[in-house]
């Protein structure tokens, strides 16, 4: 086993973001690898990421959005740790979300599946995820819906909940909702007149008065 990672943030700080039952689990996983783990301000395009070092003297880095609910933070962290393990074990011979990553992610999810500390509905969603692992939790629409249930209440709604053709705002831009393409809607941005694929579970602000 490798020496404890001196870059990792403290367990006490991780407790602010993770379910209590899994703080030690995530902290131990990170401590056993040479990785920088940062909790960062929210990003709209991703929940977390893993960055390979650019040269042999650099350290791999994981970043996770600070606004995730504890269960989403846990799943996203394990997703990125799976990338770290692929980097450590396979280096450049594997695809970003290939069979090696799926194998590592499935192994990391197993303790959650076996734990009574995970709500039953979420545990069932994770079991389904293990049998058909997606590239990201947001690609698994069933798991995404379940994780969203643990978000703090706010005034936004999911894109999938508003009517076809409805105007809404997202990231200070105005869009018109279009047709569904798998897990994303083709939406027309009104100012640039460009089309974008927006995830069905994106939190948007419907425009009440469209006249």
Image (tube, helix red, strand yellow):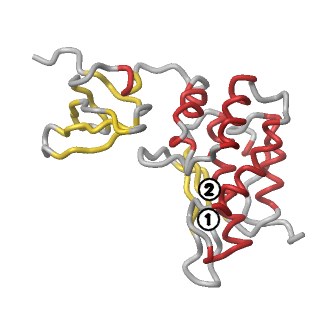
Query: Which quarter of the figure has residue 12?
Result: top right
The foreground one among 66 and 95 is 95
The foreground one among 92 and 131 is 131
Residue that sits furthest to the front in the current view: 131
Q: Are marks 2 and 1 in contact (CB under 8 Å)?
A: yes
Mark identifier at residue 185: none
Mark identifier at residue 38: 2
The foreground one among 210 and 160 is 160
**Which residue does the image show at 54% across and 28% down from the upper left?**
145
**Local secondary structure at mark 2:** strand
Whole-percent x, y for residue 149 in the image: 58, 23
Whole-percent x, y for residue 155 in the image: 41, 19
**Which residue does the image show at 55% across and 51% down from the upper left?**
135
Whole-percent x, y for residue 48 in the image: 55, 51
Residue 194 vs residue 34: left or right? left
The number of numbered badges drawn on the structure is 2
Whole-percent x, y for residue 136 in the image: 55, 48
Residue 148 vs residue 197: left or right? right
Which residue is tagged 1? 61
Marks 2 and 1, how far apart in space?
8 Å
Q: Nearer the viewer, mark 2 or mark 1?
A: 1
**Which residue does the image show at 58% across and 71% down from the upper left?**
52
**Local secondary structure at mark 1:** strand
Image quadrant holding the C terminus, namely: top left
């Amino acid at each position: 086993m490798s020496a404890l990672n001196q870059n990792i943030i403290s367990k006490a700080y991780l407790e602010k973001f993770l379910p209590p039952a899994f703080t030690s689990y995530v902290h131990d996983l990170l401590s056993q690898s040479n990785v920088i783990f940062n909790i960062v301000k929210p990003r709209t395009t991703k929940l977390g990421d893993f960055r390979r070092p650019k040269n042999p003297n650099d350290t791999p880095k994981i970043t996770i959005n600070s606004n995730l609910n504890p269960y989403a933070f846990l799943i996203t962290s394990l997703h990125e740790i799976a990338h770290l393990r692929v980097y450590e074990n396979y280096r450049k011979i594997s695809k970003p979300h290939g069979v090696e990553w799926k194998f590592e992610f499935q192994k990391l999810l197993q303790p959650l599946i076996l734990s009574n500390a995970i709500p039953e509905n979420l545990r069932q969603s994770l079991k389904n995820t293990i049998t058909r692992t997606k590239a990201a939790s947001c690609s698994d629409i069933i798991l995404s819906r379940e994780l969203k249930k643990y978000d703090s209440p706010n005034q936004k709604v999911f894109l999938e909940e508003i009517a076809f053709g409805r105007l809404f705002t997202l990231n200070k831009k105005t869009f018109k909702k279009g047709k569904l393409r798998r897990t994303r809607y083709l939406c027309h941005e009104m100012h640039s007149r460009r089309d974008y694929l927006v995830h069905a579970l994106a939190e948007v602000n419907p425009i009440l008065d469209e006249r």
